[in-house]
Structure formats: C-alpha cells, structure tokens
Image (cartoon, rainbow, N blue to C red):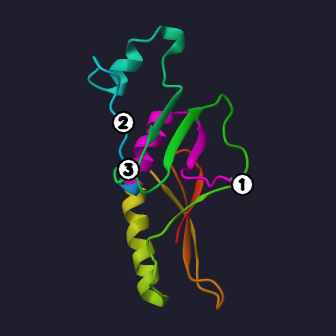
C-alpha cells in the first residue's frame, strides 16, 4: 500500500486571493507569483473578460516545503454553519498556564490586525490546555493552540 506524501487543504470562499493572503501572513507562507507578463494578481485579473474577473482560485505554500499547501476556491454560496474541519495554529506548544495564555493572546492581537476575529478563549480544564477560537477574514473557524 502506498503512503501519502503530501496533503493540500482546500477552503471554499468568496475571495480566494484575499483569503490566501491572510493565511500566508498567519503562517509565513508565500502566494506564488502571477503568470509571466503580469506585475501582480490584480493585473492578471483585470486582463480577464469582465464576466470572468475575480480570481476563481488562489493558493499559498510553505516556502520550506514542510507544511501543506493551502488552496482557496471561489464558491457562489456563503458560509452558513460551523466548519467540519479547521486548522490549529500551534503557537503555545510546550507552554502551560499563564505563559500559554499570554502567547495565545499575543498571536491573537497580531492576527486581529490582519483581519481575523477573536471568538473566545477556552481555558485549561484539567484535561486540555488553553486554546483560543478565532475566525479568518471570511469567518472560517480556526484555533490558536
């Protein structure tokens, strides 16, 4: 049986390039350059016929190649219910108590500036350590863990 070597995580969204840029800033990923002959993705988009403007998809990837590629595809419907899958951004690994909460809060503050929304903190309960529930720029839930 063959083993899987790579995983891509796909997001349905309204504005693929906006969401790709958000997640690239969160994770230190890079959005690939536009096709040759275009100064930026916006220029590429403006060159499309009017009924095809607005990128249908975008992506970002870990520049080291270690993390999964993130792919964002435009869909016509908006987000209606809670995600069935979400990302955990691991900023508090090895930290406990107040030190962990401080690390989560500091990263939350950085991400809010980028357009994220803080939902709530879930404090340690004796079984699980603290984590902070957030939403990205289109309301997709993720955790700072």
Helix, strand, or loop for circle 3? Answer: loop
Residue at 48% x, 17% y is 53
Q: Which residue is mark 3?
A: 29
Q: Nearer the viewer, residue 5 or 103?
A: 5
Alpha-carbon span between mark 3 and mark 2: 10 Å
Q: Decide which of tag 1 and tag 3 comes sooner along the chain.
A: 3
Mark 2 or 1, closer to the camera: 2
Q: Which mark is residue 84?
A: 1
Q: Which residue is mark 2?
A: 32
Mark 1 surroundings within 10 Å by alpha-carbon count, few (fewer than 14), some (14 through 19), many (20 or more): few
Please check the rendered image and state whether residue 25 is part of the magenta-colored stretch, yes or no.
yes
Alpha-carbon span between mark 2 and mark 1: 28 Å
Q: Which mark is residue 63?
A: none
Q: Nearer the viewer, residue 39 or 119?
A: 39
Residues under numbered marks 1 and 3 in contact, where contact means CB atoms less than 8 Å apart: no
Residue 134: horizontal and vertical position, in percent? Answer: 55, 61
| The magenta segment | 1-26
Q: Nearer the viewer, residue 16 or 37?
A: 37
Q: Decide which of tag 2 and tag 1 comes sooner along the chain.
A: 2
Residue 30: horizontal and vertical position, in percent? Answer: 35, 45
Helix, strand, or loop for circle 2? Answer: loop
Residue 3: horizontal and vertical position, in percent? Answer: 62, 55
Mark 2 surroundings within 10 Å by alpha-carbon count, few (fewer than 14), some (14 through 19), many (20 or more): few
Whether residue 74 is situated above or below residue 30 in the rendered picture: above
Residue at 64% x, 87% y is 125
Residue 60: horizontal and vertical position, in percent? Answer: 43, 43
Please check the rendered image and state whether residue 88 is part of the magenta-colored stretch, yes or no.
no
Helix, strand, or loop for circle 1? Answer: loop
Alpha-carbon span between mark 1 and mark 3: 23 Å
């Amino acid at each position: 049986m063959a083993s899987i070597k790579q995983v891509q995580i796909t997001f349905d969204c309204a504005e693929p390039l906006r969401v790709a840029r958000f997640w690239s800033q969160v994770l230190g990923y890079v959005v690939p350059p536009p096709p040759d002959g275009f100064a930026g993705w916006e220029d590429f988009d403006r060159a499309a016929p009017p009924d095809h403007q607005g990128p249908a998809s975008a992506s970002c990837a870990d520049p080291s190649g270690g993390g999964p590629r993130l792919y964002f595809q435009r869909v016509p419907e908006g987000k209606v219910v809670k995600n069935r899958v979400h990302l955990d951004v691991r900023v508090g690994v090895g930290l406990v108590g107040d030190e962990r909460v401080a690390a989560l809060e500091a990263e939350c503050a950085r991400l809010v500036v980028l357009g994220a929304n803080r939902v709530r903190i879930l404090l340690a309960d004796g079984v699980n350590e603290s984590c902070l529930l957030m939403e990205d720029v289109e309301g997709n839930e993720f955790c700072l863990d």
